[in-house]
Image: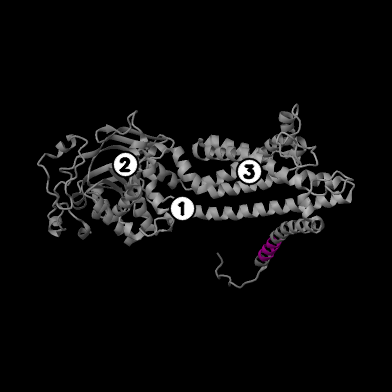
Amino acid sequence: MSETIRPEGTTPMTDQPDDATSVEPPDQPDPPDVAEARPATQLGDLAAGHDDDPTVGHPTVFELENVDVAYSGKVAIRDVNMEIHCNLVTAFIGPSGCGKTTLLRSLNRLNDLIPGAAVSGSVRYRGEDLYGSDVDAVEVRRRIGMVFQRPNPFPKSIYDNVAYGLRLHGMKDNLDERVERALRHAALWDEVKDRLKASGLSLSGGQQQRLCIARALAIEPDVVLMDEPASALDPISTQSIEDLVEQLKAEYSIIIVTHNMQQAARVADVTAFFSVDVAEDGSRSGVLVEQGPTSKLFIRPSDPRTEAYVTGRFG
Amino acid sequence: MSAAPTPLSAVNRRTVRRRAWGRVMEGLATLAALVAVGVLAIVIISVTKKGLPALNADLFTKVTSTTGIPGESGGIKNAIIGTVIMTLIATAIALPLGVLLAIFSSEFAPPRVALVIRITLNVLAGVPTIVIGVFVFGLLVVGNGYSAYAAGVALSIVQLPVVARSTEEVLLLVPGSLREAGMALGASRARTVVTVILPTAVGGIVTATIVAVARAAGETAPLLFTTGIFANAVVTDPTKPMASIPLVIFQGSESPSPQDQQVAWAAALVLLAGVLIGSSVGRLLSLRSRRRIEQTR
């Protein structure tokens, strides 16, 4: 597995201490030049446990404090405290039922749509309470896009799929240009530029998923949430999605839920490991076990549960 | 467990009995299917045989007869026009109402309310149409007289459960992932319904409409109470009673004149052909739209 890990060699942009990053002004989207700061994989780094904190120089985009998410009173995930940094790929890993998807869906308030779902604690997005009474869920979802587990293009043309969100939000100037840009961003343009009027459903699974990514990117979100975006795809399509994630983080903050640890190791700068806690009364709920630079989490996890999971002894 | 396994080819009393049962049940099921097809075939053949001789240009160009006056009458032109107009009025009421009801029940209503709506619609679908006729008679006809409007309202009550139930079925077929996709892009629930769910389900709604139109065109009882006495002339004013194909069949078949009976058979053939074509096209479209929705899963 160690070959698959790309350690972070990102040079700190500033020499602020770690915790200072979170007090930076929330509206500082300036991404560091990640492509430049990213050296080729060096196995030696891994062996030495080279784990410079990748979050240095990346302001936080989400701050979660004591977050519980419950469905009809049944707690799916409890007491999550974490920070998510912008222009990085953050992976949520863990066994089934650990609440990672539930937590992801609470970051763009998609859980609002499920009757009986309740989020408690504080979810702050760029300093604002995401669940504040005057926060508009529609605006939240415009800024925080989502890509789902199974590709779900609309039964409309490729063009209309991408233009859907643009029309919705009145971003109708230069519609063609915006659609093209989104499709290029999603590395799909060359494959579909001659058949934009064809149905989105006529594409292969991997292309459909990239179409869904283009659809999400078209409305220029700040964060892209991805819920196991490659789990329904073959290995080659999976690789193209992973490459895409790698490229996109220069402009977007990405949170990716995955069952696949190798995938987390390949794409994520920061990984959060969730597990299932069985209470004395037998009720199960997800908990965040630990979060840290991906290389550290995989090579030198600090919690035995993480170690058991990443070494394949369980899960 | 016996010590020696029985050979696969072993024929004993149990296998013989099991096989015989299997054959009997298969035979009964096949018979039932044949009876159903057979009944339809007999209806079509006999109506065609008796109606075909009177199926001529006069049928479509002349109005219904006032027995004894030959020449200008002997057709069902006014009945065809009346049926078309009254069915249109009914559909114009039932289609929007039924689709909105289906949208409410599948997209917005809490599960319990949706269940109540579904049960209510099933009950409504089972209400004898003559009862609907009497109801509309008491509501609209008493004091106002017969009218195509009243007939349209009565027919729309017949159509409503057809439209609402089949539309709801198609809406429920649209996968939840599309709803989530819409809302994750920042669309409101209503916006998602209008821009994603309805376009996906439109084929199914068209089907539901065609089936409902076919159903209304053939209804007789609601018309008896709402437009039961009509002029033997083309009427296009919906505040007046209009002739209709089902009632022409009904009256013609009761008439002592062989000419009227002949026209009734021909009218039956026209109605049967229309309804058969309508529901077949509807079913075909429904299969197509279902397949289209399957693709999105």
Q: Chain of mark 1?
A: B
Labelled pair 3, 2 in contact (Cβ < 8 Å): no
Disc 3 to disc 2, how far (Cα)? 41 Å
Q: Nearer the viewer, residue B274 or A250?
A: B274
Residue at far top of view: B143
Labelled pair 3, 1 in contact (Cβ < 8 Å): no
Amino acid on which disc 2 is placed: Ile
Picture residue at 15% right of the left edge, 58% below the top: A40
Q: Secondary structure at mark 2?
A: strand
Q: Which residues are magenta?
A: B18-27
Query: Which of the two labelled residues, at mark 3 and mark 1, occupies the earlier sequence position?
Result: 3
Q: Secondary structure at mark 3?
A: helix
Q: Position of residue B212 (x, y in %)?
A: 64, 45
Q: Position of residue A176 (x, y in %)?
A: 35, 50
Instruction: Write down the residue under mark 2.
Output: A144
Q: Nearer the viewer, residue B49 or B28?
A: B49
Labelled pair 2, 1 in contact (Cβ < 8 Å): no
Task: Determine which of the numbered discs, if any, sits on residue B162 in the image.
Answer: 3
Disc 3 to disc 1, how far (Cα)? 25 Å
Q: Position of residue A9 (x, y in %)?
A: 14, 52
Q: Chain of mark 2?
A: A
Q: Nearer the viewer, residue A107 or B15?
A: A107
